[in-house]
Image (cartoon, rainbow, N blue to C red):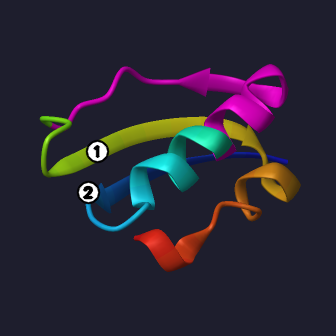
């Protein structure tokens, strides 16, 4: 089942590294990844779409 989800990640500690590593790891399995809708200096906002099994692997601890 395809799921669509929006993630809002506050840029602190190593949250951006975790976020971009996850996107790079699953990019080829996701149906859609939006451009960053956040400013990038204090918040990153992405919409992604993909199989529910992939979407649920997102590291929610960085939200």
Write down the residue under mark 2: 11
Q: Is residue 5 left or right of residue 37?
A: right
Q: Is residue 36 left or right of residue 2?
A: left
> For mark 1, does the 10 Å Cα neighbourhood hold few (<14), some (14 to 19), or many (20 or more) residues?
many
Vertical arrangement, residue 53 with respect to residue 31, above or below: below
Q: Please give the name of the residue rendered at 85% of the width and 48% of the height, measured from the top-left corner.
A: 1
Q: Is residue 13 left or right of residue 58?
A: left
Q: Secondary structure at mark 2?
A: loop
Q: Please give the name of the residue rendered at 66% of the width and 60% of the height, measured from the top-left corner.
A: 58
Give x and y (percent) for residue 49. 63, 36
Q: Label 1, label 2: how many angstroms apart (C-alpha)?
A: 7 Å
Vertical arrangement, residue 34 with respect to residue 15, above or below: above
Q: Secondary structure at mark 1?
A: strand
Q: Residue furthest front?
A: 13
**Quadrant location of the C terminus in the rendered image:** bottom left
Write down the residue under mark 1: 44
* Viewer-nearest of discs 1 and 2: 2
Vertical arrangement, residue 29 with respect to residue 41, above or below: above
Upstream in sequence: badge 1 or badge 2: 2
Give x and y (percent) for residue 21. 64, 42
Vertical arrangement, residue 14 with respect to residue 5, above or below: below
Give x and y (percent) for residue 16. 41, 49
Label 1 close to label 2 by CB (< 8 Å): yes
> For mark 2, does the 10 Å Cα neighbourhood hold few (<14), some (14 to 19), or many (20 or more) residues?
some
Report the front residue among 20 and 8: 20
User: Start and end of the magenta stretch?
Assistant: 22-38
Q: Please give the name of the residue rendered at 63% of the width and 36% of the height, measured from the top-left corner.
A: 23
Q: Is residue 6 left or right of residue 1?
A: left
Give x and y (percent) for residue 34. 43, 24
Report the front residue among 45 and 14: 14
Q: Quadrant of residue 36?
A: top left
In reply to whether residue 53 is colored magenta, the answer given is no
């Amino acid at each position: 089942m395809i799921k669509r989800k929006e993630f809002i990640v506050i840029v602190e500690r190593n949250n951006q590294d975790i976020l971009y590593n996850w996107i790079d790891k699953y990019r080829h399995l996701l149906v859609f990844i939006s451009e960053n809708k956040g400013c990038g200096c204090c918040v990153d906002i992405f919409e992604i779409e993909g199989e529910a099994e992939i979407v649920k692997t997102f590291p929610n601890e960085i939200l």
